[in-house]
Amino acid sequence: MRATPAGIDPRGPRVGAGITAVLLAVVVLLGPTTAGLVLLAVVAAGFGLGAARGVTGTVQAWVFATFVRPRLAPPTDLEDPRPPRFAQVVGLVVTGAGVLLGLAGVPTAVPWAAAVAFVAAGLNAAVGLCLGCELYLLGLRLRTASRRR
């Protein structure tokens, strides 16, 4: 059995989600334009970094660590980094699909993908509900239940 990775400050992913939500809101406002497609591709690349390097390896995490974290008290609890990393994969799939469909000539996919990702990022930033993290935990429960049979 693998050891649980070192914990992360749970406020970091929430700040990152807030930054991402702002970027996604701009994509929605830009609509099915070239600028919207390019910005969605930037957001997708950010999710790609988070999926590959973990949530602490993103530009948003750097912003948190550099500008926000030094002004806060130490966290009272640390969080397992695996669920937020999985959430980055989910974000990559949603925004990546929007980018690919936009490039394939379905420009309305760009604001729709951004809107879906915006809802998830906004929930995380506003109330701490990480939908991708919940999917990760659901997957764990289903795997555990299937092993018991």
Image (spheres, rainbow, N blue to C red):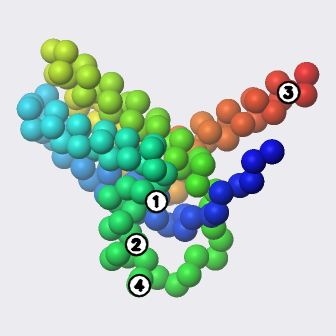
Distance (Cα) linking label 2 and label 1? 9 Å
Q: Name the residue tied to disc 1.
A: 56
Q: Earlier in the sequence, mark 4 or mark 2?
A: 2
Q: Nearer the viewer, mark 4 or mark 3?
A: 3
Q: Secondary structure at mark 4?
A: helix
Mark 1 residue type: Thr
Q: Secondary structure at mark 3?
A: helix
Task: Say which mark, if any, is on residue 147.
Answer: 3
Distance (Cα) linking label 1 and label 3? 31 Å
Q: Name the residue tied to disc 2.
A: 65
Q: Nearer the viewer, mark 1 or mark 4?
A: 1
Q: Secondary structure at mark 1?
A: helix
For residue 67, what is the image quadrant?
bottom left
Determine crowd level at label 4: few under 14, some 14-19, many 20+ residues with C-alpha closer than 10 A: few
Distance (Cα) linking label 4 and label 2? 10 Å
Task: Say which mark, if any, is on residue 82.
Answer: none
Work out which quarter of the rendered image holds the N terminus and state it. top right
Q: Earlier in the sequence, mark 3 or mark 2?
A: 2
